[in-house]
Image (cartoon, rainbow, N blue to C red):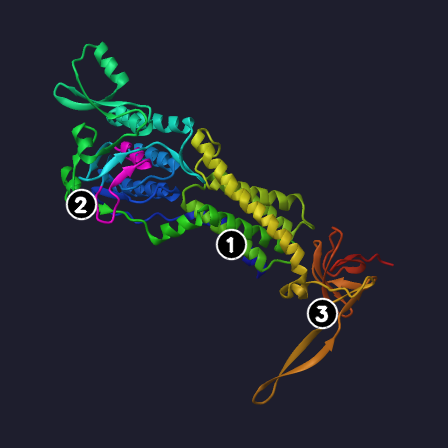
Amino acid sequence: MRPRVVFACAFYLISVPVLIAESEVIPAEVYVIPLKEDVDRYLGVFLGRSLEEAERAGAKAVIIEIDTFGGRVDTALEIATKIGAATWTKTIAYVPADSGGRGVSWSAGALMAFSCAEIWMAPGTSIGAAAPVYQTTEGVQAAEEKAVSAVRGQMAALAEKNGYPIGVALAMVDADVVLKEVVIDGSESLLTGADIEAMERKNIRLEIGKTISDKGKLLTLTAGEMERYGVSAGSASTREEVIANFGYAPEDAVVLEKSRADSIITVLTSGAVVSLLVIVALVALYLEITSPGFGVPGTIALACFATLFVSSGLMGNLGAMEILMLLAGVILLLLEIFVIPGFGIAGIGGILLILGALVLSQQDFFWPQFDWQWDIAKRNFGIVGAGVIGGFVLIGVVMALLPRASLFSRLVLHGPGDSGYAGKPWRRRKREKGNSEEIETLTGRKSAAVEIGAIGVAITDLRPVGKVRFENGVFVAETDGEYCEKNTQVIVQRIDGVKAVVTAKEEG
């Protein structure tokens, strides 16, 4: 049964991420995807899966409801890329003013809004303040220039692609951009100082009004200002009004929502949980490799790795490279546990391959190309690295405390002195059935002891740890690294702490 268990777990570990079923598609003209929370890693996965579902349904319009204070810049860039790639439909950003919402599209939310073909806003909402920041022990601080430059360039590119004023996009990200109100041919717009100078050189007649965003301030516009300056397509108090503006009825729309499973995946892919699962998996692997056969520790290790990789697969980050590395790592570990004696290159290589696959499964790229991708890679390496360090520390604690733990005292021998090695007294119980009841009788009690020079027979393979039957009982023993097959006669050479070290008995 044990080989069946391990291979079943290995098959589950390798195959489940590849066999994720697609959700049921509901045909509709309009799909609504609410993004009403802080921007985290799983929000990008939810949006990507929702866009795929809308594409399979043949939706002619996709409304992205954005109501957020912001969040992860890398996820916002990922979301903007996915929305921009949805050329098969019309994408509309809508900032609602629900009673339970925030009514804002700030920071990363502004980046996501500008990635859509049109922007609609409910009265009383606002958008802007998209400069990247990071949290420190001293509070929120502005990001470095390279991060600001990346977001600034992306915002400008999105504005240029979708026909929004580029100056507005820049002023929302860069506090050094000055934005002024300008009237051209009777219509109001917002231009930077450089844009104004360029128009004056072309002899375009314009009237310069008040300064909307001065140096040192980030631009934030209300719904009315967005419409007034021609940035948004219009104002709509409800989602139904937005749908009606495109000629559809409310019953033509399907609203997608995050499920309980989505919330569970969000927790499982958080940094703290990933590190914890890595720690548990490594400690369980140590216990499995240093004990004979395959048992509970090995099952726990495989279950932890399965949870890590399945959740990464659900995040959409598990590709062919990660699967191949995972497969190779699992095969090496199985060879180490069942075939190769001792623990060496195969076992270490298997663990390194699995950990490497785990790092790559936390991101949707293989090698970082941009600064923000390097930040993601460093974060993922730090999370897995923290789990590895924590696992090794806990393994050291287990090595120091395991022999003294009462739970494991039957697995080790306790020596009375330098000359020998004694186990705890044991009791063997025998059950005998009478005519009307089952009775239990004590049939024996004796003190178990193994002396240096004692001869026994291995009842399991010693790789190098296994079980040996001596004249006075069965004990766990180990070799100096050599492999002894089952039924080999062995002799106790020395007592090493609480362990008996044996070698194969020479014939004759």
User: In the rendered image, which residue does mark 3 sit on?
Assistant: 424
Asked which secondary structure carries label 1, the reply is: helix
From what the image shows, is residue 321 above or below residue 160?
A: below
Q: Which mark is residue 84?
A: none
Earlier sequence position, callout 1 versus callout 2:
2
Q: Which residues are magenta?
A: 96-116
User: In the rendered image, which residue does mark 2 sit on?
Assistant: 252
Mark 2, residues whose alpha carbon is within 10 Å: few (<14), some, or many (≥20)?
A: few
Earlier sequence position, callout 2 versus callout 3:
2
Q: Amino acid at mark 1?
A: Ala
Q: Which mark is residue 303?
A: 1
User: Is residue 108 one of those drawn in magenta?
Assistant: yes
Asked which secondary structure carries label 2, the reply is: helix
Q: Residue furthest right?
A: 508
The residue closer to the viewer here, 127 or 257, is 127
Q: Amino acid at mark 3?
A: Lys
Mark 2–mark 3 distance (CA, rounded to whole Å): 75 Å
The total of numbered circles placed on residues is 3
The residue closer to the viewer here, 208 or 206, is 208
